[in-house]
């Protein structure tokens, strides 16, 4: 095991002892947020990313070792495992090298080479490979009963055997693999009969680019074009040069036998080696592209989940529409539905607009509304303009409604509002997304939120793992109100999961609000281990224990009590008086279990118990009078909201129902390697219109000016 720790240490740049301790915690059932927050002394202060990397690399190594064990077992059972082969397999460090060693010993289906061996042509193949210039007696290989009628058929079978042997040569494959990895080109051609249908892939109709230089988004776009049968795609180096590598590896001399070996080399490359390595090198490139795309998706998701909440404010939410009107709901501070109705604020009838105006004013007064949320879909800008014309006191805020329809049609929406239709549920989701984006977005599949890059094309299990890790991180970084949170939000708390979340809500509904964190232990099936994992991330506001509203873990309560006794003050004084906390010497509280990192975290929490790491909310408004793409002109400066960040730039909502693209070259002066380091999702920006293509609905923007 120490050898594995050393290997992981070299790959991750993390000390072996940190890796060992982290894996021990993971194997004991500890979650990433819990380890990162409450076990800093054990791991040496590793964050969630480092812990996840350790977990993922361990899984990868376990999979590799499992495959090696299966190969050794298979070879041993078939009597093929000698000492040299065992040592070669045991010493190999990569999966590709392992598979190269095993390739000649794989149990094969019927191949041209296996058929030739049955015809008794293996000795002929051996004679040819020797290339010693001796005359070959073909009579002994011609056998009509076995299907070898003449010399040409004998040679053809022998070449098939040689081609397979060449394909299985580990040293040659390693040499050629390097050539593919270094010199392969991504080549795509449009299928001529599909040219008209393939217009969106026009940039890739005749692409020939070195694979190592192809960015992730371009590779995934080309492969999507291939899967949709619009493009033909190849990934290979120069054929003539690569075939010469194979020939140099096997061909010796210029005699008859050498010419046959040369023919076998060409056949082996074209029929066996090239398709195999082409697939392999493409898979490696896809894996890198997937990793990059998932990284960007996860970064975008984090910004969206940690977007500034309006907070516990009463909201009037509008899900706009033209013909069907706007579905309007009033929500209290906790997001509970108080009232719903249908209004026509952008109707052609003046009487309907007057009625909408009067009803809106009434609802604001009756329900003490503090903000108006307007979905940014169809009729969103027009509804905003109508509300602004009323000169209302509460702010009018555009809300991204991506995924609201999925919540309203999904199980969560149906369970929560069984007596209301989809439109009411959708409006509720819009209003709640303004109040607390995190609490509402956790109810959706992250892939439906719309901040990814080719999220349906990448490795789905890797994507799911990355997104789940990110949601878990965000939920636990913010903390969860034990007495008001939904089942979906509680499900992401460290150690809990959907079943226990449902049990917590059931207990809460039956027994009333939790008075303390300790009361969690009364929830059926919630044992000590789960309590340890979850308690620090759950908040009980206004309860019996003041620390229950903070991120201080219950395991540290006795330590904080010691601090208060040391200062001869109450817990309340310790929390509220900064001068008292400054009298503490943290070194006095260091022990074998608690170090300075944990003590510093505790002091930060005592200063601002339960602090929300999200930014403060700032009201954003689009430019007045700009509602559609035809309202734009080149040089126009507009406020906008970043909706998505990709490797090639950022998409910005400027309020015309069509996001504009800020190309990576227009994000700032100078070279930008990673757009996520320049802009983030939900960031408020000012952009300049560079170009407008109304027929194709394309808007080009700049952040430079």
Image (cartoon, rainbow, N blue to C red):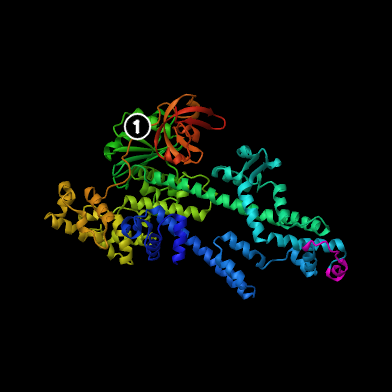
Dividing the image into 4 quarters, which one contains the N terminus?
A: bottom left
Camera-side residue: 606 or 328? Answer: 606
Q: Residue at x 67, y 65 (%)?
A: 104
Query: In the image as oriented, which residue stretches furthest toward the left?
Result: 568
Q: Position of residue 114 (x, y in %)?
A: 74, 66
Indicate yes or no whether the magenta region holds residue 139: yes
For the question of whether residue 418 can be seen, the reply is: no
Dividing the image into 4 quarters, which one contains the C terminus?
A: top left
In the image, residue 677 sits, relative to residue 511, either above or below, namely above
What are the residue bounds of the magenta stretch? 130-146
Camera-side residue: 347 or 388? Answer: 388
In the image: residue 588, left or right of residue 55: left
Q: Which residue is mark 1?
A: 357
- Asked which secondary structure carries label 1, the reply is helix
Q: Specify the quadrant of the image occupied by residue 669.
A: top left
Q: Residue at x 44, y 66 (%)?
A: 2
Camera-side residue: 342 or 695? Answer: 695
Q: Position of residue 13 (x, y in %)?
A: 43, 54
Q: Position of residue 96 (x, y in %)?
A: 59, 59
Camera-side residue: 202 or 16? Answer: 16
In the image: residue 176, left or right of residue 581: right
């Amino acid at each position: 095991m120490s050898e594995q720790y050393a290997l992981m240490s070299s790959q991750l740049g993390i000390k072996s002892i940190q890796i060992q301790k982290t894996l021990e915690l993971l194997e004991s059932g500890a979650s990433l947020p819990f380890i990162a927050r409450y076990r800093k002394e054990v791991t040496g202060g590793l964050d969630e990313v480092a812990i996840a990397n350790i977990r993922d690399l361990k899984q990868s190594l376990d999979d590799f070792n499992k495959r090696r064990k299966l190969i050794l077992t298979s070879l041993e059972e078939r009597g093929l495992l000698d000492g040299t082969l065992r040592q070669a397999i045991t010493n190999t460090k990569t999966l590709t090298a392992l598979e190269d060693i095993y390739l000649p010993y794989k149990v094969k289906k019927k191949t041209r080479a296996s058929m030739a061996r049955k015809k008794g042509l293996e000795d002929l193949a051996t004679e040819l490979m020797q290339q010693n210039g001796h005359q070959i007696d073909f009579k002994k290989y011609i056998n009509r009963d076995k299907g070898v009628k003449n010399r040409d058929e004998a040679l053809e079978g022998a070449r098939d055997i040689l081609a397979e042997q060449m394909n299985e040569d580990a040293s040659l494959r390693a040499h050629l693999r390097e050539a593919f990895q270094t010199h392969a080109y991504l080549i795509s051609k449009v299928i001529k009969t599909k040219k008209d249908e393939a217009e969106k892939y026009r940039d890739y109709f005749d692409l020939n680019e070195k694979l190592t230089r192809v960015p992730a988004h371009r590779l995934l776009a080309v492969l999507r074009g291939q899967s949709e049968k619009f493009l033909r795609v190849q990934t290979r180096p120069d054929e003539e040069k690569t075939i010469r590598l194979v020939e140099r590896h096997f061909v010796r001399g210029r005699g008859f036998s050498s010419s046959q070996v040369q023919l076998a080399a060409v056949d082996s490359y074209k029929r066996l080696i090239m398709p195999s390595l082409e697939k392999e090198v493409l898979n490696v490139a896809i894996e890198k592209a997937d990793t990059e795309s998932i990284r960007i998706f996860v970064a975008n998701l984090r910004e969206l989940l940690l977007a500034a909440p309006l907070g516990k404010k009463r909201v009037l939410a509008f899900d706009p529409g033209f013909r069907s009107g706007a579905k309007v709901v009033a929500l209290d501070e906790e997001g509970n539905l108080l009232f719903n109705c249908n209004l026509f604020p952008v109707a052609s009838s003046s009487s309907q607009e007057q009625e909408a105006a009067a009803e809106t004013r009434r609802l604001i007064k009756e329900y003490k509304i503090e903000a108006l949320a307007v979905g940014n879909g169809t009729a969103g800008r027009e509804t905003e303009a109508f509300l602004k014309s009323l000169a209302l006191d509460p702010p009018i805020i555009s809300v991204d409604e991506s995924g609201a329809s999925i919540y309203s049609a999904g199980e969560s929406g149906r369970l929560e509002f069984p007596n209301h239709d989809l439109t009411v549920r959708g409006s509720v989701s819009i209003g709640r997304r303004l109040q607390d984006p995190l609490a509402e977005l956790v109810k959706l599949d992250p892939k439906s939120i719309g901040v990814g890059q080719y999220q349906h094309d990448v490795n789905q299990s890797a994507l799911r793992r990355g997104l789940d890790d990110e949601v878990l991180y965000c939920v636990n970084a913010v903390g969860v109100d034990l007495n008001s949170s939904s089942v979906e939000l509680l499900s992401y708390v460290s150690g809990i999961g959907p079943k226990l979340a449902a049990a917590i809500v059931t207990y809460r509904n039956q027994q009333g609000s939790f008075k303390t964190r300790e009361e969690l232990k009364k929830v059926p099936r919630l044992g000590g281990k789960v309590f340890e994992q979850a308690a620090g991330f759950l908040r009980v506001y206004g309860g019996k224990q003041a620390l229950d509203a903070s991120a201080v873990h219950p395991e540290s309560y006795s330590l904080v009590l010691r601090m208060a006794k040391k200062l001869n003050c109450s817990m309340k004084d310790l929390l509220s008086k900064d001068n008292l906390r400054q009298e503490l010497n943290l070194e006095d509280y260091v022990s074998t279990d608690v170090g300075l990192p944990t003590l510093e975290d505790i002091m930060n929490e005592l200063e601002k118990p339960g602090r929300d790491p999200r930014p403060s909310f700032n009201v954003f408004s689009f430019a007045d009078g700009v509602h559609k793409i035809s309202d734009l002109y080149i040089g126009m400066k507009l406020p906008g909201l970043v909706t998505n960040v990709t490797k090639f730039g950022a998409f910005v909502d400027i309020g015309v129902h069509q996001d504009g693209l800020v190309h990576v070259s227009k994000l700032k002066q100078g070279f930008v390697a990673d757009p996520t380091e320049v802009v983030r999702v939900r960031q408020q920006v000012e952009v300049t219109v560079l170009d407008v293509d109304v027929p194709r609905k394309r808007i080009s923007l700049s952040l430079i000016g």
